[in-house]
Image (cartoon, rainbow, N blue to C red):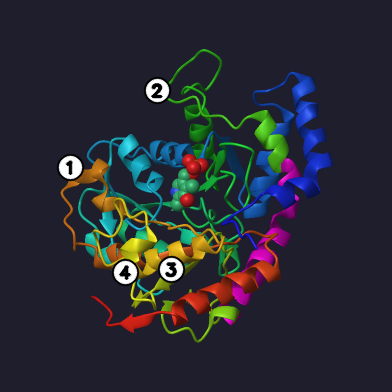
Amino acid sequence: MQVPPFSLSKQIEELQPELDEAVLRVLRSGNYIGGQVVQAFEETFAASINVPYAIGCNSGTDALILALRALDIGQGDEVITCSFSFFATAEAISAVGATPVFVDVDPNDYLIDLQKVEDAISPATRAILPVHLFGRPVDMERLMKLAKKKDLKVIEDCAQACGTKWNDQSVGSWGDIGCFSFFPTKNLGAAGDAGATTTKDFHLAKRMRELAIHGMPRRYLHAELGYNSRLDAIQAAILNVKLPRLPAWIEKRQLIAARYQELLKDLQDIDLPVSNNQLNMVHSWNQYVIKVRNHPVDDSGKSQESINIDTEGIGKYGDSRSRDWLKASLYKNDINTIIYYPIPIHLQPAYQGLNYKIGELPIAEKLCSQVLSLPIFPEITFEQQKYVAEKIKQILSSATRLQVLT
Ligand SMILES: *Cc1c(COP(=O)(O)O)cnc(C)c1O
């Protein structure tokens, strides 16, 4: 049995007549930039988040850049964020000339540690940029309280969290601005790059709209330097077909996650995602991420090296051999898993200039050597999940467990 980490083929098959029609209608209309199709998506998307404004743009990365610019964050400003995320989170902060200040994450839910956010606030801090990583919401009540107390702006990175809620309120509606990505592997995916920002503030909405079109409040009047970052009409047409399906897809992702929790419980060598059931939150499960704890060795006495693990750039920040070994063994069984993320952002070569040292954000660093994302997408079958679980069990039980290396 083959299990890909993510697959769109069933979804495309199911939606094909509607997708074909929607795309062809735009193609034949000749209206490729802006227009009714884009506006319709922005309105429905805003309504789904329960905010008055959603502004389509070119990508989730651009959404973050537009948000930071609209809040006048730039040179000399610090923005507090987490190092355990996709690189774009920090890259956007640097792109507007500001400095990302990385804080560590909570070891249980992998989300930004709000106590450490408070400790990192300096006179130069202008904003907090939390990431609802893997589809799990940050405690936005607590974060907004802190932001209010310290007079800081809040930009939510909701790229992986379309459909996520904290206390019955969608992410992207808590902070000043929410930033979404419709990259094909996200919960709501376009057929290429696409993104959006959300806000309750009319002026921020207007500013982001103008920034996305060359800083142009009206035709050929350029009030400031902006970008060319629009949501394509063809992408909007695809998103219009998919958006009504999102709630059902999220429910499937939740069911799939619950099945993994059940199938994988009682395994000593891995930690499953914590299931904060007591909290009033909706986890949208963009990823199902396990932590591989111990250091299993192949029964036959072969070392991991002989399994041919691609560890280039991986494992410098902690012992990743167990994780890499499990990943490689699953791969041999046609199960393809992904590491989100192998290198913490503060230790990326691109951020050498910020002078973070190995050991400075120990939890994020250790996670990078232990996390493994199992296959998850709404159309994965129970059979495929059972096969994944079975193989994980087999592989782990064939191993002699050694001491945890800390
Ligand atoms: C995907 C992603 C982004 C960037 O979105 P793009 O649409 O790929 O530009 C930003 N932050 C996080 C956490 C992401 O997962």
Q: Is residue 350 visible?
A: yes
**Label 1: how many residues lie within 10 Å, few (<14), some (14-19) or many (20+)?**
few
The residue that mark 4 highlights is 303
Q: CA distance from mark 2 to mark 1?
A: 27 Å
Residue depth check, mark 3 versus mark 4: number of the one nearer the observer? 4
Residue 94 percent location from the top left of the image? 30, 39
Counting residues from the N terminus, which is met first, the one under dot 2 or under dot 1?
A: 2
The verdict on label 4 being within 8 Å of ligand 1 is no
**Label 3: how many residues lie within 10 Å, few (<14), some (14-19) or many (20+)?**
many
What's the magenta region? 240-262
Q: Amino acid at mark 2?
A: Leu
- Numbered disc 2: secondary structure: loop
Discs 3, 4 touching: Cβ within 8 Å: no
Counting residues from the N terminus, which is met first, the one under dot 3 or under dot 1?
A: 3
**Label 2: how many residues lie within 10 Å, few (<14), some (14-19) or many (20+)?**
few
Q: Residue at x 19, y 62 (%)?
A: 360
Predominant SS along the magenta part: helix
Residue depth check, mark 1 versus mark 4: number of the one nearer the observer? 4
- Numbered disc 1: secondary structure: helix
Discs 3, 2 touching: Cβ within 8 Å: no
The residue that mark 2 highlights is 225
Counting residues from the N terminus, which is met first, the one under dot 3 or under dot 4?
A: 4
Q: Residue at x 70, y 66 (%)?
A: 381
**Label 4: how many residues lie within 10 Å, few (<14), some (14-19) or many (20+)?**
some
Residue 82 percent location from the top left of the image? 33, 57
Counting residues from the N terminus, which is met first, the one under dot 3 or under dot 2?
A: 2
Residue 43, quarter of picture: top right
The residue that mark 3 highlights is 326
